[in-house]
Image: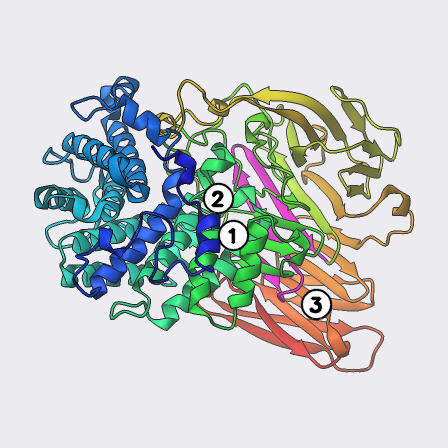
């Protein structure tokens, strides 16, 4: 019998085919076109599509589940059941049991392709027995993911891999199950509503498989077109006009199960249809390329994704979620798009190399990008990646659901991810204090459970104000927090080598409860030193620092220009994944006798405990995050000037830069003897660029349509002031930052 590890993984397969997944040949032993089609017939267009999809599915087989082919064959009983699976799930989890059964069938189908002779016959016999359990049996419609997507998709993939081994009756019964999600009018249904986003991409692909299995070209064409339409951009869910991704309502999911799955699945289908009469239009390939490179690449550092972008997948071990080794990797999308060529082919190749760990993180493109449809800003420099994840009355904060991510309540309340290598948060999340999410200010009351927001419903932010300003190189973001008894006005200023973080008007509705602002909570690495104690701080103790100064950890210096009530702690912690995730379908993917080991390691935590005796205007904070700044260089370091940090203006300045959050119309005198005036609440960046030119960028964090006039006046020059008006439209472009350039100032 062939060993499980003989099945090709993505990397092995790509090397064997020169990177062209959509090639016409299948180049490993025992697999060929004759197993899919009549060997005496010329490959039809449908046959070619089926062959290409089979190639893709074979690369996913090693990730289907934990059980080896040998175990599956040894434990399958004469009736086609796996007794361990039957005993594992309660009656209310029937859908999960079916899904687990179908993924095991898929695993066997992959092995069937590789096998020859007697092993192939044994696998075929086992497959027919296992299929008989569900074929011809009722398959409930509108019953959620396991019935409408999970089980049908696994069955369809297995059927494509089995090819002519299926009888006509088996094939017809499988097609019936694949069409479970199709309403009488042809609309794809998901849990009683029209499918959208990645759910639609899955269901449309399932219907393409149904059409291929029934040799119905019109049916294949119909649902291939539905999949193509869902690419957008600008759909209600799916890819947005800023190349972020939404699922389950207006919820940012570019780095999670849905956004990563969409890029993989849409590009896989596009590649299968390439150079056929059903090929996706060039503009759709361009949209997918931009989504991967402009929408997902900025969220990464090395092989890791920003934890604020992955949704409820933050509660899964990395191997089951947003990881280059999993089926949801952006690496797969890059590999699918590379054969299309185009001017960004080299960038796709480079991105895939970084996600595989074959290139250094500092080779990634630099820049600042505002995702105004998703209340998120990403900032990439050669030495680090930083972000701010916000929410508003337009955009959900987070989601729990299905016993997953039940502690992620504050993930959209101004969370800040900071990565240098990409390993800073990898699989740390069971160890977190979830009331100290990095970047977040909140009431700290562990005696009250964090609220749940199933599938994102009700997790909108409490204000219209969340967004950013950017000229593509540098930028800033800000949000107004109204959540769980707290008000705060928060701002992040993303510069060449630092991020300045300001908070103002921080008020608890209950003055008796403590308020904290978390600065970071990551894996401890190396010594922790401070301006008050340059020797390494010992583990297991909480250290207090109240004067202006600094803290240094893992190559990052945190500067505090004003007296701040800091807490610093490094401690050994251990916790199982079930701390965050008790989803019953975990057991369909993991060996219940050998669950994932508890996560254990040293965790570095840095946070502010705000003094309850703060002023009526509320608490404030200010700190500068400086990756790469060594303690020995702090004295000579020129930190940006914090010009204002109030409930009306938050601003920083450098000689050639000013970034200002105008919470109200007003004016601000800058240190370089310039004055900025605006007639509407907005965000402004005034920056000297190349050749002594200046750029003026304006952000519209409330998405209010209308005009904003900005006046820049030099108090020492006789030149006339610069006054320019920016017009923000209604609709999805309202939050896009606008930029104008000036020859001199």
Residue 184 magenta-drawn? no
Q: Which mark is residue 550?
A: none
Q: Position of residue 219 (x, y in %)?
A: 16, 59
Front in this rendered view, residue 596 or 695? 596
Q: Position of residue 668 (x, y in %)?
A: 73, 62
Crowding at dot 3, Cα within 10 Å, few <14 / some 14-19 / many 20+, comes out as many
Instruction: Classify residue 466 as left or right of residue 152.
Output: right
Above-or-below relation of 41 to 695: above
Residue 479 magenta-drawn? yes
Q: Residue at x 67, y 44 (%)?
A: 504
* In contact (CB < 8 Å): disc 1 and disc 2: yes
Q: Which mark is residue 461?
A: 2
Q: CA distance from mark 1 to mark 3?
A: 22 Å
> Which residue has dot 3 on it?
686
Sequence order check: which comes first, mark 3 or mark 2? Answer: 2
Q: Quadrant of residue 402?
A: top left
Instruction: Classify residue 497 as left or right of residue 248.
Output: right
Q: Position of residue 613 (x, y in %)?
A: 72, 29
Give the magenta-colored segment's residue range: 466-495
Instruction: Classify residue 586 as left or right of residue 95.
Output: right
Sequence order check: which comes first, mark 1 or mark 3? Answer: 1
Q: Residue furthest front?
A: 117
Classify the position of the N terminus by image quarter: top left
> Which residue has dot 1 on it?
375
């Amino acid at each position: 019998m062939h060993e499980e590890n003989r099945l090709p993984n993505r990397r092995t397969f790509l090397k064997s085919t020169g990177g062209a997944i959509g090639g016409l040949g299948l180049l490993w032993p025992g697999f060929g076109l004759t197993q899919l089609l009549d060997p005496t017939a010329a490959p039809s267009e449908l046959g070619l599509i089926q062959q290409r999809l089979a190639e893709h599915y074979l690369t996913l087989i090693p990730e289907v589940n934990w059980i080896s082919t040998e175990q599956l064959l040894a434990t399958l009983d004469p009736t086609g059941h796996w007794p361990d699976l039957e005993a594992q799930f309660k009656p209310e989890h029937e859908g999960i049991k079916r899904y687990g059964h179908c993924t095991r069938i898929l695993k066997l189908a992959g092995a069937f392709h590789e096998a020859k002779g007697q092993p192939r016959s044994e696998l075929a016999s086992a497959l027919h027995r296992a299929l008989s359990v569900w074929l011809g049996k009722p398959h409930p419609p509108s019953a959620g993911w396991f019935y409408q997507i999970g089980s049908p998709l696994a069955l369809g993939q297995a059927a494509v891999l089995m090819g002519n081994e299926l009888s006509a009756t088996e094939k017809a019964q499988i097609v019936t199950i694949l069409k479970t999600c199709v309403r009488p009018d042809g609309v794809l249904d998901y849990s009683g509503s029209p499918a959208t986003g990645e759910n639609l991409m899955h269901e449309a692909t399932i219907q393409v498989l149904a059409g291929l299995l029934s040799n119905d070209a019109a049916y294949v064409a119909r649902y291939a077109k539905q999949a193509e339409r869902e690419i957008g951009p600008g759909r209600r869910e799916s890819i947005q006009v800023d190349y972020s991704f939404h699922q389950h309502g207006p919820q940012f999911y570019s780095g999670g199960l849905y956004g990563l799955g969409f890029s993989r699945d849409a590009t896989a289908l596009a590649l299968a249809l390439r150079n056929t009469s059903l090929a996706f239009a060039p503009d759709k390939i361009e949209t997918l390329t931009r989504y991967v490179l402009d929408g997902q690449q900025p969220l990464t550092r090395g092989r890791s994704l920003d934890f604020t972008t992955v949704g409820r997948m933050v509660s899964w071990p990395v191997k089951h979620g947003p990881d280059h080794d999993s089926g949801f990797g952006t690496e797969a999308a890059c590999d699918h798009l590379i054969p299309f060529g185009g001017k960004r082919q080299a960038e796709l190749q480079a991105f895939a190399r970084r996600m595989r760990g074959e290139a250094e993180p500092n080779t990634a493109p630099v820049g600042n990008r505002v995702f105004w449809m998703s209340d998120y800003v990403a900032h990439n420099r050669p030495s680090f990646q930083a972000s701010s994840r916000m929410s508003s009355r337009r955009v959900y904060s987070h989601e729990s659901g299905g016993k997953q991510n039940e502690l992620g309540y504050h993930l959209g309340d101004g969370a800040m991810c900071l990565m240098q290598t990409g390993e800073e948060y990898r699989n740390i999340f069971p160890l977190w204090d979830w009331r100290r999410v990095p970047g977040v200010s909140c009431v700290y009351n562990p005696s009250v459970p964090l609220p749940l927001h199933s599938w994102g419903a009700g997790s909108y932010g409490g204000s219209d104000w969340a967004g950013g300003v950017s000229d593509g190189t540098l930028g800033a973001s800000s949000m107004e927090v109204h959540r769980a008894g707290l008000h705060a006005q928060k701002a992040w200023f993303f510069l060449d080598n630092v991020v300045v973080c300001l908070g103002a008007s921080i008020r608890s509705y209950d003055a008796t409860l403590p308020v904290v602002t978390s600065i970071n909570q990551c894996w401890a690495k190396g010594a922790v030193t401070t301006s008050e104690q340059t020797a390494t701080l010992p583990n297991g103790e909480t250290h207090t620092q109240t004067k202006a100064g600094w803290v240094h950890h893992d190559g990052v210096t945190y500067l505090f220009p004003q007296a701040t009530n800091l807490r610093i702690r490094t401690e050994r912690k251990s916790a199982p994944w079930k701390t965050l995730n008790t989803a019953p379908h975990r057991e369909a993917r993991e060996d219940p006798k050998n669950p994932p080991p508890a996560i254990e390691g040293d965790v570095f935590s840095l946070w502010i405990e705000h003094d309850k005796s703060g002023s009526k205007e509320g608490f404030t904070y200010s700190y500068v995050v400086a990756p790469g700044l060594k303690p020995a260089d702090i004295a000579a370091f020129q930190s940006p000037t914090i010009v204002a940090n109030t409930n009306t203006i938050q601003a920083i300045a450098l000689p050639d830069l000013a970034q200002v959050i105008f919470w109200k119309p007003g004016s601000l005198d800058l240190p370089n003897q310039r004055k900025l005036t605006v007639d509407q609440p907005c965000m402004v960046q005034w920056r000297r660029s190349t050749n002594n030119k200046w750029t003026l960028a304006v952000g519209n964090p409330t998405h209010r349509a209308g005009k904003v006039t900005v006046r820049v006046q030099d108090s020492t020059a006789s030149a006339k002031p610069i006054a320019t008006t920016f017009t923000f439209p209604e609709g999805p472009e309202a939050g896009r930052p606008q930029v104008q350039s000036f020859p001199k100032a």
